[in-house]
Image: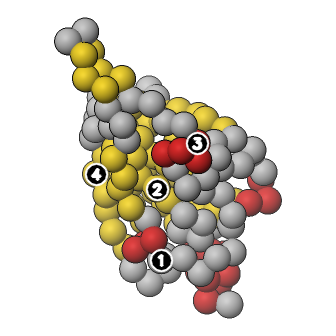
Amino acid sequence: MKNSSIFDCCVIPLSKIHNRAGNITIVEGIKNLPFDVNRVYYLYDIPGGEARGGHAHKALIQLIVAASGSFDVLLDDGTNKKIVKLNRPDYGLLVVPGIWRELFEFSSGAICLVLVSTKYEESDYIRIYDDYLNVKNA
């Protein structure tokens, strides 16, 4: 697992094409992101007070977007922590490997869209925080 810092994660603007009939944002893998998109998923209908995430990845890179509504993302590198509020569909949070993340404070009707660098592999996840800290401190 890469020795990443929360400072390697950043909010990036996505292209926004405005039209009187509405806006469109287009994301084209390597053209707009530092990775090719191999998987897309979205979270929705999250009950009030619930949190998602609560894990780290060894190799996977993600772009997290508030497609609708808003939510907060806690980023934790084992030493530093920061919270990023996502509330615009034309901005995404780039999360690099080796960062613990938790998503919470979902607004009513929020949709969290996630673009991912790899196919699903359970072995890429670290799901227990103490295990994460052990790996980071090894």
Numbered disc 3: secondary structure: helix
Q: Are marks 2 and 1 in contact (CB under 8 Å)?
A: no
Look at 49% across and 36% down and name the residue there. Answer: 27
| Residue type pointed to by label 3 | Gly
Would you name the residue on which mark 4 appears?
85
Mark 3–mark 4 distance (CA, rounded to whole Å): 23 Å
Numbered disc 1: secondary structure: loop
| Residue type pointed to by label 2 | Leu
Task: Please provide percent x and percent y for residue 58.
Answer: 68, 67
Task: Please provide percent x and percent y for residue 47.
Answer: 40, 32
Q: Are marks 3 and 2 in contact (CB under 8 Å)?
A: no
Numbered disc 4: secondary structure: strand
Would you name the residue on which mark 3 appears?
29
Identify the mark nearer the N-term, 3 or 1: 1
Q: Crowdedness of circle 1 by 10 Å Cα count: few (<14), some, many (20+)?
A: some
Q: Nearer the viewer, residue 29 or 6?
A: 29
Identify the mark nearer the N-term, 3 or 4: 3
| Residue type pointed to by label 4 | Lys
Q: Crowdedness of circle 3 by 10 Å Cα count: few (<14), some, many (20+)?
A: some
Which marked residue is nearer to the observer: mark 1 or mark 4? 1
Mark 4–mark 2 distance (CA, rounded to whole Å): 13 Å
Instruction: Say if 122 sits above or below 99 in the image.
Output: above
Residue 94: mark in rendering: 2
Residue 5: mark in rendering: 1
Q: Are marks 3 and 1 in contact (CB under 8 Å)?
A: no
